Amino acid sequence: MSTPLTIVARIEARPDKIELVKAELLNLVEPSLREAGCIQYDLHQDNDDPAVFLFYENWESRELWQAHSNAAHIAAYRKATEGAVAAFTLNEMTRI
C-alpha cells in the first residue's frame, strides 16, 4: 500500500491578476476532487493578502498526484494564468 501524500501549494498572483488567478484556481477544485486518488483538495485565500492562495491536498499516493499534475484541467489552468502568477511554491509532505 502506498503512503498518502500531502501537497501544500502556495500561489501568489500578480496584483492586477488576482481575480483571474482566483477564478482559474476555483475551476480546478471540482475536476480534481473527481480524480482517482484525490482525498482532499481545499483552496484557501489569505485574509490579509488577497493575492495569496493556498491549496491543501491529500492524495492516496504520489503516483496518483503526478497523474493529476498532468491532467487536462491543470494544463488549461497553466495556459490561462501564464504571466499572471508572481510566485509558486509546492511542498510534497508526509503526515507524521
Image (cartoon, rainbow, N blue to C red):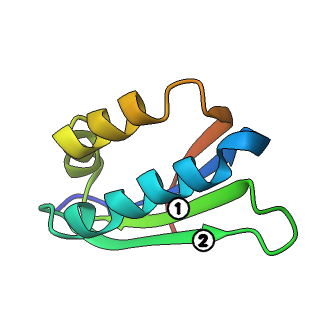
| Location of residue 25 by image quarter | bottom left
Judge by depth and name the residue closer to the eye, 20 or 9. Answer: 20
Any part of residue 96 in sight: no
Q: Are marks 2 and 1 in contact (CB under 8 Å)?
A: yes
Q: CA distance from mark 2 to mark 1?
A: 6 Å
Considering only vertical position in the picture, is 61 above or below 79?
below
- Residue at position x 34%, y 57% in the image: 28
Element type at marker 1?
A: strand
Give the camera-side residue of 6 and 33: 33
Amino acid, disc 1: Phe
x%, y% of residue 55?
Answer: 53, 61
Q: Nearer the viewer, residue 15 or 87?
A: 15
**In the image, is 96 to the left or to the right of 48?**
left
Q: Would residue 50 appear left or right of 92 to someone viewing this image?
A: right
Give the residue furthest to the top: 83
Using a 10 Å C-alpha cutoff, classify the residue at mark 1 as few (fewer than 14 neighbours), some (14 to 19) or many (20 or more). Answer: some
Q: How many marks?
A: 2
Three-letter code, disc 2: His
Image position, residue 63 (x, y; %): 22, 44
Q: Which residue is mark 1?
A: 55
Res. 44 mark: 2
Q: Is residue 8 above or below residue 13?
A: below
Spot occupied by residue 33 in the image (x, y as percentages of width and height)? 24, 70
Q: Quadrant of the C terminus?
A: bottom right
Q: In the image, is 93 to the left or to the right of 73? A: right
Tag 2 secondary structure: strand
Q: Is 37 placed above or below 84 here?
A: below
